[in-house]
Amino acid sequence: MGSIFSKEPVQREPTPLERIGPEITHLKNKTSVRDGANKRKMPWTIAIILFTLLGLYIMDPFLYAFHRYEAIRAYLYLHNYDNTTAAQALIDTGIFTSDEIHTMNNERGSYQDYFSSPQKAEQKAASIVRYVKGVGDLHAGRYNELGVVGKIRYTFFVSTGLMPPTTWAAINPSVE
């Protein structure tokens, strides 16, 4: 048993280097949070950017196939219900060949289920005409007439000489 008059030894304060020493060695480690976080995010960021650019490059064949399908339905509805101006606007876009137009003109049937009203068919036809005009503007290089996505695509592809594809015959709907 010690004397009651003796003092406990005073704890000495650690130096700043002793305090941050373990942290410095941890950060020098290859698995530290600071280095690991940046290395893990970089491949995902690059992959997302590349897939976005690829999607912007090949989006037209898929959108064209969708709009072509809708154009067939709209043309049949409009032609059979005597709206020749909207039907002629679809023909003027060049989305159909002359053989397809001849085939659709000779088709007779009940196409009233395609749209709920003639106004809906006219709106769909106008939307298709705008889309085809936008693709034509992109390929012709009319930058001022493009929308936001068209301007982005023009900047990345058309201005660099990489012309995006418009159609792929394998996915286009046919007129039969």
Image (spheres, rainbow, N blue to C red):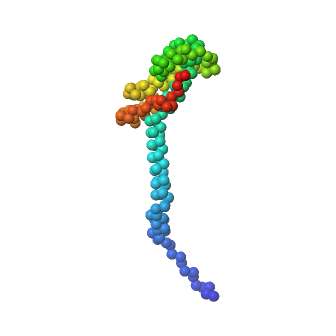
Quadrant the N terminus occupies:
bottom right
Using the rendered view, name the quadrant where residue 77 is placed.
top right
Above or below residue 34? Residue 25 is: below
Residue 102 placement, left or right of 153: right
* Residue at screen point 47% across, 40% down: 52
Counting labels gives 0
* Residue at screen point 57% across, 21% down: 73
Above or below residue 1? Residue 167 is: above
* Residue at screen point 48% across, 21% down: 96
* Residue at screen point 47% across, 24% down: 132
Q: Position of residue 169 (x, y in %)?
A: 47, 29
Q: Position of residue 12 (x, y in %)?
A: 51, 75
Quadrant the C terminus occupies:
top right
Towards the viewer: 21 or 32:
32
Above or below residue 29? Residue 121 is: above
Towards the viewer: 41 or 17:
41
Q: Position of residue 109 (x, y in %)?
A: 61, 16
Q: Is residue 117 visible?
A: no
Q: Position of residue 159 (x, y in %)?
A: 36, 33
Towards the viewer: 11 or 45:
45
Q: Is residue 100 visible?
A: yes
